[in-house]
Amino acid sequence: NEAWHHEDRLEIHPHDAENRGIHDGDWVSLRSRAGETTLRALITERVAPGVVYTTFHHPDTQANVITTDYSDWATNCPEYKVTAVQVMPSNGPSEWQKSYRAQAEHSRRIEEPAE
């Protein structure tokens, strides 16, 4: 039975979170040489120290921006497992995420029928 989450979360080991001053639910910046995104932290021992994990499901996270152009030759799947990243506290979603969310909300608006 899988649990569905309403947002992508960055799973981070308690020791790594403590070293960075990150608490459960805090906004964190996830940055690689390819790009950057911001999401909330989920402190867990499901990941090893020095390793972070996130899902790639929700479009306003755009977690794929941190991956490089390199991919598996057979599946064309980006090399997620070898992407080196920096994790640091953040004040909230990045500017591109705010812009993306605003545009998505605008495009989903349904005009109320006239009475």
Image: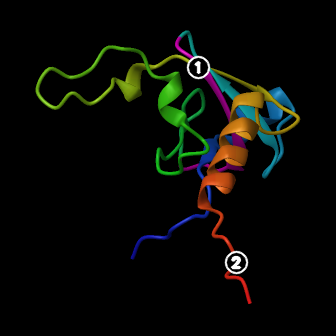
Above or below for 15 versus 43: above
Report the amino acid beneath label 1: Val
- Left or right placement of residue 12 versus residue 92 in this view: left
Residue 41 visible? The answer is no
Report the residue that reaches farthest toward the left: 74
How many numbered circles does the render carry? 2
Residue 72 at x, y percent in the picture: 21, 23
Assign the magenta stretch its main secondary structure.
Answer: strand
From the image, state whether disc 2 or disc 1 is nearer to you.
Answer: 2
- The structure residue drawn at horizontal position 57% and vertical position 64%, both measured from the top left corner, is 5
The quarter of the picture where residue 35 lies is top right
Q: Magenta part of the protein: which range? A: 34-46
Residue 44 at x, y percent in the picture: 64, 50
N-terminal of the pair, mark 2 or mark 1, is 1
Reading the image, the residue beneath label 1 is 85
Q: Secondary structure at mark 1?
A: loop
Reading the image, the residue beneath label 2 is 112
